[in-house]
Amino acid sequence: MARTTCWPDRGCRDSQVAARRGSAAPHRALCFYEIYDDEAAHKAHGESAQFQAYGFGDAIPRLESRERVFYETLS
């Protein structure tokens, strides 16, 4: 299982990383799936020092493309 970057005390309920079947490194297609308590928790995560350092400072610049899609959970 992949290491996640979810902090329940900061409003993150779940975080998973999945690779598309048949895609191989170094050009592996990945999906990051995260569930937050609310929009404010998601915004706080994006503004955190960790995300600024590892997301914008490392991971995001290495992406070939990036698409963000937001969903609401059904209950």
Image (tube, helix red, strand yellow):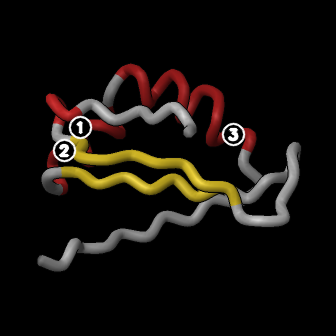
Q: Are marks 2 and 3 in contact (CB under 8 Å)?
A: no
Question: Which mark sits nearer the N-terminus, 2 or 3?
Answer: 2
Label ID, residue 33: none
Q: Secondary structure at mark 2?
A: helix
Residue 11 vs 19, above or below: the answer is: above
Residue 8 vs 35, above or below: the answer is: above
Q: Quadrant of the N terminus?
A: top right
**Image coords of residue 15 (percent x, y):** 39, 46
* Residue behind mark 1: 44
Callout 2 amino acid: Ala
**Image coords of residue 54 (percent x, y):** 54, 26
Residue 70 vs 40, above or below: the answer is: below
**Image coords of residue 64 (percent x, y):** 77, 54
Q: Secondary structure at mark 1?
A: helix
Q: Residues within 10 Å of mark 3 (few under 14, many from 20)?
A: few
Q: Please tell me which residue is depicted at 79% across the width and 53% down the height of the picture.
A: 28
**Image coords of residue 60 (percent x, y):** 62, 42
Residue 38 vs 72, above or below: the answer is: above
Q: Left of 25 or right of it: where is 19?
A: left
Label ID, residue 61: 3
The alpha-carbon separation of the residues under discs 1 and 3 comes to 21 Å
